Image (cartoon, grey):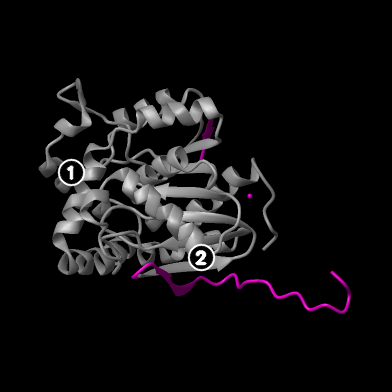
Amino acid sequence: MHQSAPSSPQATVLRPSHDVRWRQVQMGRTTVDYAVGGHGRPVLFLHGWGLGPATYRTALHELAHRGVRVYAPAMPGFGGTPELPVGERTIDGYAQWVGRFVDAVGIRGRVTVVGHSFGGGVGVRTAHDLPDHVDELVLVNSVGGARWLSEGIDRPIHERPIWDWMLHLPADALGSRSVGQVVGAIAGVALPNVIRDPMAVWRAGHLARTADLRPELEVLARRQLPVTLLWGTGDTVIPEASFASMRAALGEPNVMMVRGKHCWPISDPVRFGDTVQRVLARSGELVSA
């Protein structure tokens, strides 16, 4: 499907604030920072490569005002969360970490996972490996399609040179609407991440650059898990061929096309909130804001 781019009388009921707040949770020996806000069905937001939940501060605020309870952790290697142990530095290692985070913050039942870019790839693997944790998946300009075009030739994504990725990332940000807002939000988080642990950022970037999650997407399609692809049509970071291969692997997913570049959830947070609300309204109740 394709769309263009919703007790007793004496008791005192206390609901969580719509405002997004910053908290910490202990996961083993590690302290993890995360954002949380709103009330309603639980939504887990997974950030893009090199970034953190603070980059999406306004986007998270928009989600929190649209009938959901949003959680957004700083994933391993970013935002002060230590990198995963050596044997777990894989997409499935990130997925297992996500499952532990959901348990640590006390979410009961399944969550809707919304993942942007690298976070989308982690979301795919989380839904695949931990079906008891995920009831719906929303992929926003996500990695995982594993294809790109070079001089008109369809090639595996791992053949795309790292310099090509690095060239398109800043160009995409500079070409976004609200360019100052986008660059400020990205630089304010990405630079500290690089300074804090440059090798962790590099290794996660390699995972994002080479991820082929088409087999996992095919499994999710067979399970009939609700999956929506949100695609900013001006994206130059994730090739359109990659998006098309993800769509093909899913069969007939819900697809919503949005004007914007790779970073459109950051540059246009209101549209992001509206679009996600429309997706979630199709599959379940939202609490009135």
Location of residue 216 in the rendering, given as x and y in whole percent from the top left corner: 40, 31
**Which residue is at a point 27% across and 37% down the rendered structure image?**
211
| Mark 2 → mark 1, Cα distance in angstroms | 34 Å
Q: Quadrant of residue 218?
A: top left
Please indicate, yes or no, whether residue 242 appears anywhere in the rendered image: yes
Asked if residue 25 is among those painted magenta in the image, a careful observer would answer yes
Location of residue 28 in the rendering, given as x and y in whole percent from the top left corner: 38, 67
For residue 143, side relative to residue 256 (left or right): left
**Which residue is at a point 62% across and 71% down the rendered structure image?**
16
For residue 249, side relative to residue 182 (left or right): right
Please indicate, yes or no, whether residue 59 appears anywhere in the rendered image: no
For residue 113, side relative to residue 108 (left or right): left
Q: Which residue is mark 2?
A: 105
Viewer-nearest residue: 176 or 35: 35
Mark linked to residue 165: 1
Q: Is residue 280 above or below residue 57?
A: above
SS for callout 1: helix
Viewer-nearest residue: 264 or 211: 211
Label 2 amino acid? Val
Quadrant, the N terminus: top right
Location of residue 281 in the rendering, given as x and y in whole percent from the top left corner: 64, 45
Viewer-nearest residue: 187 or 121: 121
Viewer-nearest residue: 38 or 25: 25
Label 1 amino acid? Trp
